[in-house]
Amino acid sequence: MIEKLTPEQEAKFPEYVERYIAKGLKTGETDRERFERGIHGCYDLAKLDRVPVIFVSSPIVGALAAPIAANVIHALKARSGSAVVSAVESAVDRSVYSAVVSAVVSAKGLFWHYWWGGQFGVSYVAYASFMRDELGVNIPSLAAYEDTCESGCYWWPNKDFCIACERPSEINMDDRGRLHSETGLAISWPDGWGIYRWHGVEVPKEAIENPASITVKQIKDCNNAETRRALIEIMGTGKYLIESGAQLIDTDFVEIEKGSGVRMPRMLLRSPEGDQYLEGTDGSTERCYWMNVPPTAITCREAHEAICGLKEDRCIAQG
């Protein structure tokens, strides 16, 4: 029994972290042959008959198609004489079939089935492969699951079929590893579907594609605090505070470097939502910054000290 890792084994952790993060964030062409092999291997382990693997171009297609197909097949097999079955069997063109699909999706008793993350579920593979490769632990089921996580994206298993999603075509992140793009989709798939994120926070498409369209009313009507804060950042904190009629709490001047004699103005404002911001100027670039500060601060000095975690005199002395 392994009860403790050696220093040499622990030293391998960063290597595995880096390797499997890269696998999880891989974009481009799907290795369909390996993906399908892995899926069939998982079915074998579950003692289920292998099924056809159908590839789709994005998660939205898989998420919609998998339950619809499962329910239509279930209804056809049941042949209960229900309206759904009759509609499916009498479908003669695309418009009728679309109507049936809508009915199936909205029908009571719609059942869902599991989905797996593919490359986005690679964290377990990182752990298990370390146990296997570095500690010699035998994990018979790992190879098949490893194939699915290292070759493609989401997949939806069903007893009659399996839907598999292509890899993302593009993934954009900020310097903290959060999904982020200031100009378009943060993550997108081959068919053009994707999601918009601002430093990991979900925002409407228009906020990214047309930031000038953001209004104070839209921000005030937003119930999600994180999304509201993201919209303020995109609009421009200063612009939002001015247009929303923010309350001026305090103003003063601060010496940017002890003994320099150079003093820069700053002000503390409170937004209509109760959030407070300290506006300060970078002495070297003269660029203005808006920093979110605790609502308990009533002076610029208190706000600055809350950000630094130190008394202001020490902050300035330390540069």
Image (cartoon, helix red, strand yellow):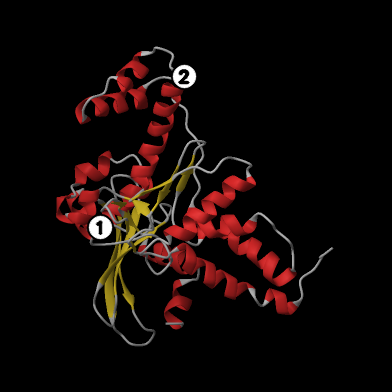
Residue at the location (39% across, 12% down)?
81
Residue at 21% from the left image edge and 31% from the top image edge: 94
* Residue in the picture at 56% in, 40% down: 49
Q: Give the structural element (helix, strand or loop) at label 1.
A: helix
Q: Quadrant of the C terminus?
A: bottom left
Determine which residue is flagged by label 1. Answer: 234
Bin the neighbour count of mark 1 within 10 Å (Cα to Cα): few under 14, some 14-19, many 20 and up: some
Please tell me whether mark 2 or mark 1 is closer to you in this view.
Answer: 2
Of labels 2 and 1, earlier in sequence is: 2
- Is the C-beta separation of discs 2 and 1 under 8 Å? no
Residue furthest to the right: 1
Question: Residue 273, how many percent across, how many down?
Answer: 32, 44
Left or right placement of residue 105 versus residue 17 in this view: left
Nearer the observer, 181 or 120 = 120
Q: Is residue 127 visible?
A: yes
In depth, the one of 197 and 172 nearer the eye is 172
> Is 180 on the left-hand or right-hand side of 77?
left
Query: Helix or strand or loop: what does disc 2 sit on?
Result: helix
What is the count of numbered marks?
2
Q: Is residue 139 left or right of residue 261?
A: right
Query: What x and y, as percent, mark residue 107?
Result: 38, 21
Q: Reply above or below: 285 against 29.
A: below
Say which of 313 and 88 sits in front: 88
Q: In the rendering, at what x and y percent does residue 83 appear?
A: 34, 14
Q: Quadrant of the N terminus?
A: bottom right
Label 2, label 1: how far apart the Cα atoms are = 53 Å
Which three-letter amino acid code belongs to the residue tagged 2? Ala
Disc 2: which residue: 78
